[in-house]
Image: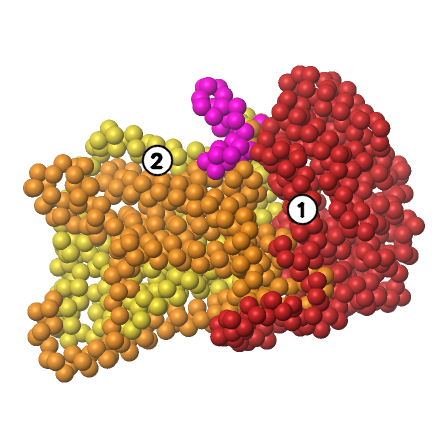
Amino acid sequence: MSTLTALRPSAQRTGTSRATQPRREKGRLHPIVWVFAVLVMGFSLVPFYWLVSTSLKKGPSLGQGELFPSQPTLDNYLSVFGNGDFLLALRNSVIIAVVTTLVALVFASFAAYALARLKMRRKALVLTLVLSVTTFPAIAIAAPMFAIWREIGLYDTLLGLIIPKLTFALPLAIYTLTSFFRDIPRELEESAYVDGATPFQAFRRVILPLAIPGLATTAILVFISVWNEFLLAVTLTSSPAARPVPVAIAFFNGMSEFDVPLGRISAASVIVTIPLVVLVLICQKRIVAGMTAGAVKG
Amino acid sequence: MDRPAFSNPSPAGPRGVRTRSTRRRGVAAALAAAGAISLALSGCGTSASPSAGPTAQAVDPASAKGASGSLSICGGRDSVGLYKGTVDAFMKANPGITAKYIVLGATTDDARTQAVQRLQAKSGECDLFLTDVTWTPEFASQGWLQDMTKVTDAVKGTLIPSTVATTQYKGKSWATPYYTNAGLLYYAKDKVAKPETWKQVYAEAAKAPGNGLVYQAKQYEGLTVNFLELLYSAGGDVIDGQGNVKIDSPETRKVLDFMASGVKNGSADRAVLTYEENSTRLAYESGKYGYERNWPNVYGQLNATPLKGTFGVAPLPSFDGSSKGSGVLGGWNLAISAFSSNPGAAVAFVNFESSPEWQKHVAMDYSQAPAGEAAYSDPEVLAKMPFAQELLVSVKGAKPRPVSPVYAQISEAINKNVHAVLAGDSSTEDAVKKMAEQIKAAQASF
Amino acid sequence: MTAIRALVPERSRSTRDRAERRLAARMTAPSLILMALVAAVPIGYAIWLSLNQYSLRQAGLSRFVGLGNYIDALAGPDWWRAFGQTFLFAACSVSLEMVLGTGMAMLLNLAFRGRAFLRTVVLVPYAIITVVSAITWQTMFDPTTGFVPQILAAFHLPGAGVVWLGEQGYALAVIVMADVWKTTPFAALIILAGLQAISQETYEAAELDGANRWETFLHVTLPLLRPAIVLAAIFRTLDALRIFDLPFVLTHGANGTQSMSMLAYGQLNENRLVGQGSALSILTFLTVMIVSAVYIRFGGGNIRDIAREDHR
């Protein structure tokens, strides 16, 4: 056990030594890289800017195609925040996405460790089954799920959404984590074994800390996919008490059945990206922080 | 798809099918076992007993008296608050009943998918469904609705006959009209002439770049409606009362050629190929066009723009003056689910919404086209809806879309092929042939 | 590592192997049991539906047709047209996403001021609800009210005066752009995590060998990134081959943009041909699984290595 604990600081030190020697000097970039960076930003931001600009328009100015709203208004935002159903949906979405992401990380890291590291029968079969669950078209299973969910009382509840969303998010989490765990050098676990650690201890004390960038990446990917999922959400709910954001936005009313309330839809979409941006800001530090794995491998 | 299904109503099917299945008996048996389990579990299985069908139970109008308990009304997005408004007013008038409105889907398609899911699962969640006028034959033939003939007959006298017609299938009424809809032509009074015929509109629209016509020609249900409006005006039809396919006609060719050359010569901006109702409205509001085909709701929104006062509203014109102008009927009905546990309260709700008093509110408070005829000449309504008389002409003259349980397939056959002609990807002749073929195939799948 | 293993006595190794297998079973159990409980019945039911034909005339009337629905689908032109259009879309968007995603990941891996900001900014498109992003691109390219046609016309750029979403080729281009815009961050994020696993020493060794930056990238970075790129490509292809929302909102399948999922959706939900629609869904599923298998087999990477380990 003593080697095991001694091992972690050493691994981290290698990581730190790498972090203190960044590959390029801070602040100076090759001009081509600069151009690329600007293009990437532009491509990412222009459509998003259009969404923001639409969210500041009202009534006839929505049809003018102005890049800069001539009469910007916050009315859409006020109306969205004044919509009780939307706020409820925001709460539902946060609960669903947070719970699903956390449980998915636990379940998937277990399964991924077994697949990446342990001796196990029929790995190919397990990998295929896992992939097929996420590949199966949701439209084909929506109707039977609705019937079963009603039967067992999960219909129109938050738990009733968390369970299927977890199921269909797990394959992505399992695959990414399996691949990340695989990249962690075996030497670290082997020395833990020599030290008398059980495989599970090796997983908990060696793999998990080293896999933080992989876990953070997976958390972002799972969170966003759960946050944006629509079909199951609309099929398995019927009241604002259980409805998540994408459905609530789709149900925004307009001036008629043919009217698409572009302004309010845009405002709501801008608002709901904020929790995601916060999540990314939290997670992205972790992505940079845990670079020990590769450092040791080399 | 091209196999004529159910020519033999025996569930076992013709011999050819059996031979094919015995060859794969092993796999099939295993899958069948799995299927049987899930069937039992899910409860949306299909038993072979053809008990349902248009011979479903009939609702007793008297059951509305003294009805109580809870009532759920399910349908699409409550876009103008009409549904919630009706529910609230209804509960005020009937304190014994607790009613609520459940939103099933954002679009007509979503709402139908969700409604079908509930009906297939024999779910009693919804007592009343808001049904699009094109769904009646499908829902009725599947045994999902209760026979409402007596309920509808009782209020028939006050409703516009064309709206009542959309509730009929096989001689019975399966729903009661809620509100209706018909296309209108908006035109820029300062730029173009008042619409008299479609030919004149197209000619006028081609005269100057700012005179163009915008309508809905994206490949979807809206294009079916826009095409049928011209086809009906030109005297054409899709299927007749006996279900014979009538689309392969000189009228269809004439209308297709006319619309395609309109896109080509700029009478209608090529942009229409991507337009739905909302984008059409926004395009016209930009002031770059002379004519707009759209629904009545656009009136209020146009009045909130700088174009206020510059535009006129007209019923859809005739094709070339030789036949009558005709629109296509839109709107929504209310139908009682076969699985409702409280049909009495449902009847009470239907009686309430179809009453002349509430129909007036439909127009006055929610700017929807009422199904009740008296509302159109009510002074309070006219103050809110100055074009009510034009609208009434449109609704009265409007024809229903093809009446068939496979309407969705028929509509797809129409809008796909019409779109291809308008985009220049298909010849008129090809499209007409394909439409006729695909509509026949759709009927065979029934 | 073999040396270390040799140190452990033979008997305790076999005990440990058994313990390890037990642990593996226990660690995969929660995921597999959940998937079996939730997904197995609906999937089995969908397969059953695909083997039957259901009457639209009379509820409750069905007949077993075996593989008839599949044979019909494969014999008709609709499936193959959708198949071709979907593959064209997937090939264009996934290849662009991998190239751009790798570039984006390299960029985000550099140390420069504002990196945290850039990392967040590039992820924003991925965070936007799919249908909303489709509506955004639709309004951007609207011929009358969108700003893209206005800018193209103002600067006399190619594509000016074209009704983008109403034209073969152009419509596909908009859908590809919208998809690349939204999902490149997904690929970039996975590739970035893979990039973190390459050590500084590897680069230094390459520099000592006299390799320039481009050669280092080509011969050192890229091969080491392969597991991450293959992983990103698997999931992106899997989604691209099932593309639905973008064409559904932007074109409704017109102008050469009918995808396999749209076809299945149309038959299943719009036309309510439940048997045929389920068969089309399952054909889509099989297609995607076959493509994934090809990726894993020929793309290499960690997943293939793991799939090949079958400890008996």
* Residue B214 horizontal side relative to residue A248, left or right: right
The answer to whether residue B331 is seen in the rendering is no
Asked if residue B35 is positioned above or below residue B334 in the image, the reply reads below
Q: The disc labelled 2 sits on which kind of residue?
A: Val
Q: Circle 2 sits in a helix, a strand or a loop, which is it?
A: helix
Q: Residue at x 73, y 31 (%)?
A: B254
Q: Circle 1 sits in a helix, a strand or a loop, which is it?
A: helix
Q: Which of the 4 image quarters holds residue C12? A: bottom left
Query: Does residue A115 show up magenta in the picture?
Result: no
Residue C265 percent coordinates (x, y): 56, 53
Looking at this view, name the residue that lies furthest to the right.
B157
Report which residue position mark 2 lands on. A40
Q: Which residues are magenta?
A: C144-173
Residue A33 percent coordinates (x, y): 26, 33
Q: Which chain is red?
A: B
Q: Which chain is orange?
A: C
* Parent chain of label 2: A
Q: Residue at x 62, y 29 (%)?
A: B283
Report which residue position mark 1 lands on. B437
Asked if residue B117 is positioned above or below residue A72 in the image, the reply reads below
